[in-house]
Every structure is written in structure tokens, then in C-alpha cells.
Image (cartoon, rainbow, N blue to C red):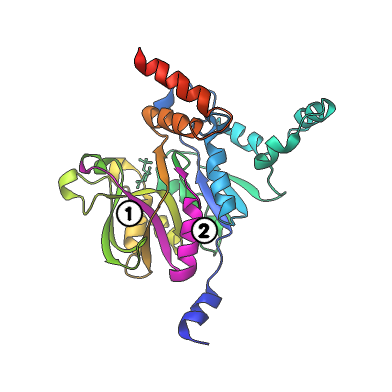
Amino acid sequence: MTVSTAWQALRKPIRKAVFPVAGMGTRFLPATKAIPKEMLPIIDRPLIQYAVDEAREAGIEQLIFVTGRGKTAIVEHFDTAFELERTLSDRGKDLSILDPTRILPGNLVTVRQQVPMGLGHAIWCARAIVGDEPFAIFLPDELMIGTPGCMKEMVDAYNEVGGNLISVLEVPEEEVSSYGVIAPGARVSDKLTEVTGLVEKPKRENAPSNLIISGRYILQPEVMRTLEGQEKGAGGEIQLTDAMARMIGSQPFHAVTFTGRRFDCGSKAGFVEATLALALERPDMADDVRAIMRRLLAQ
Ligand code: G1P
């Protein structure tokens, strides 16, 4: 056995994904007063469904939701709705529309983040469930559309290089201060670049590049121990980016440039953009929506 095949044999598959969904969704108030932001629909599927579909496509089995007060609708969405199914089947309706919401027993776990202390703290709240395995993270606000999906591309890259991976994309320089930004190192392939540094929400003039972290991660379990002692960072919050930055050097870190499209559904304009873009791709709606858009633009 060569060194690299030995490392491959040791490499654990990515079976678990953490979805931090405890945020209060203040940017979408009053819509999010009683409904979790992640349940707002892009056409007819809630935002969280897109992230879960992407996770499953990548082979992830266990979903770990880091939730908070008022977020039970997310768990309900992935539960069996007996009365609904009974009613649909009594009426001879097709139940397959509900298939994406079905989770194997035991494969959905929730933990609570009792206080909003930042993304790093939210991830750390899942440490007992993640255990000693590498795991994925999905920020559901970032809607990634592609074939294959973003996480599938990342898992494929992980199977080659192992270690830690983050998805990145280029943004205009004036936007870098809203994101985590990477310092890129050597280019490994078209899609894969080494990461030599990470900064959360830098000022434009201090940003090491315009490549931002776009909400998908594959991390080794050691990040949980790093998060344990993590000081507050940007915005007075415990930042995942800061913990990852401290791991660079002791573990491989790569950035994957996603070849599909990304919609920032944390912003209202991005949400509308995603809705329109996906509607224009749906055979059941595209013609109607195109006609509506033309009419609106002509006014
Ligand atoms: C978080 C991360 C940031 C990342 C961003 C992507 O920031 O901390 O590194 O670039 O998500 O959306 P937040 O949007 O929670 O401020």
C-alpha cells in the first residue's frame, strides 16, 4: 500500500451535516416573526429543502439542525404528516411530492443554540453529535444550484485531497467586508486552491483577496476543540472563520470554486432573484413567468 492509498483507507466518509438554523431572520421581519427564515419558500420548496437536497445528493446521511426558539416548523417539515398523507391518498393524489421531506428514522437530530453567539458557537453546539468524524456544514441562506451540486463537488474533492475544504466564489471588492475571505495559495487544479489564510469580514483594504467563503464547508472534527477556546471576533461573535484560520498549517485546507450558481437568499433582492431564476427554469411555469416579467418591465 502506498502512502496515499493508506491515507485514503484511513479517510472517513462525510456522513453528517450541520445546518445552523437558529438565527432570528431579522432581515425578513415581519415575515419571520412566527415562521423560521429557512421555511420561506423559493416557489414551492422552503429554503432549507434546497440545502437538504444538496446534502443528500452528496451522500450525507445524518442531518444535524442547530435550532433555537420558534424553529420547530423546520423539524415538522421533515416529519411524517400522517393526516395530510391520509387525506391525499384518500383523494387519490400522488404522495411523491412529499418524498424530499422524508428522512430515515434517527437521521434527523436537533440541538439548541440557546444564545446567539455567532456561527462558530452554533457549530460548536453540535459537537457531541458530530463526534470524531469529518462533517459538512451548510448555511441555508446561500442557495447553491448546479449539476452536480456544490457539496457533491466538495465531497469529490475531499476524496482526492482530504483535510478541510470550503467553497469560495469571487465577489466585487466592495462586497468583501460582508463575508469571510480567503488568502489563496497554490492552485492545485481548475477548481481547487490551497488556503493560506482566512479573515472574517475584513475591511476592503485589508482583504487578502476577493474570494469569499460561500456557505459550504467540510471540516475535520478538531475544529470543535479549536472552537472551544475561540475568542469573540468580528461583530463580537464567535466566528467559525477564526477557528478555521487557527487550524491552517496543522491540517490541509483547500478552497473549491463552485461551478454552478449561487443566490444570496439572506438578502431580499437575492431571494427575489433566486425565485425568478428558478421559476424561469421550471417547465410548468417558465412561459407564464417570462410573460409576466416582460409585462412588468414594459410598464
Ligand atoms: C457567514 C460566515 C462568512 C461567510 C458567510 C456566507 O457570515 O461567517 O464567513 O462568508 O456566512 O454567507 P454571516 O452571513 O453569517 O454574517
Q: Among all residues in the image, which is located at the extreme right?
A: 90
Q: Is residue 160 magenta?
A: yes
Q: Residues within 10 Å of mark 1 (few under 14, many from 20)?
A: many
Side of 59 where 164 appears, left or right: left
The amino acid sitting under disc 2 is Phe
The amino acid sitting under disc 1 is Asp
Is any part of residue 117 visible from this angle?
no
Q: Is mark 1 within 8 Å of ligand 1?
A: no
Q: Assign a secondary structure to mark 2.
A: strand
Q: Is residue 152 above or below residue 175?
A: below
Image region (quadrant) for ligand 1 = top left
Q: Assign a secondary structure to mark 1.
A: helix
Disc 1 versus disc 2: nearer the observer = 2
- State the residue in front, 9 or 274: 274
- State the residue in front, 111 or 175: 175
Q: Is residue 256 above or below residue 138?
A: below
Q: Residue at x 49, y 86 (%)?
A: 2
Q: Residue at x 51, y 26 (%)?
A: 287
Residues drawn in magenta: 144-173
Query: Residue 234, image x and y in percent?
Result: 29, 44
Side of 252 where 234 appears, left or right: left
Q: Among all residues in the image, which is located at the extreme bottom?
A: 1
Q: CA distance from mark 1 to mark 2?
A: 18 Å
Query: Residue 153, image x and y in percent?
Result: 47, 57
Quarter of the figure that contains the C terminus: top left
Is any part of residue 163 visible from this angle?
yes
Q: Name the residue carrying label 1.
A: 242
Q: Name the residue carrying label 2.
A: 135
Q: Residues within 10 Å of mark 2 (few under 14, many from 20)?
A: many
Q: Among all residues in the image, which is located at the extreme top?
A: 299
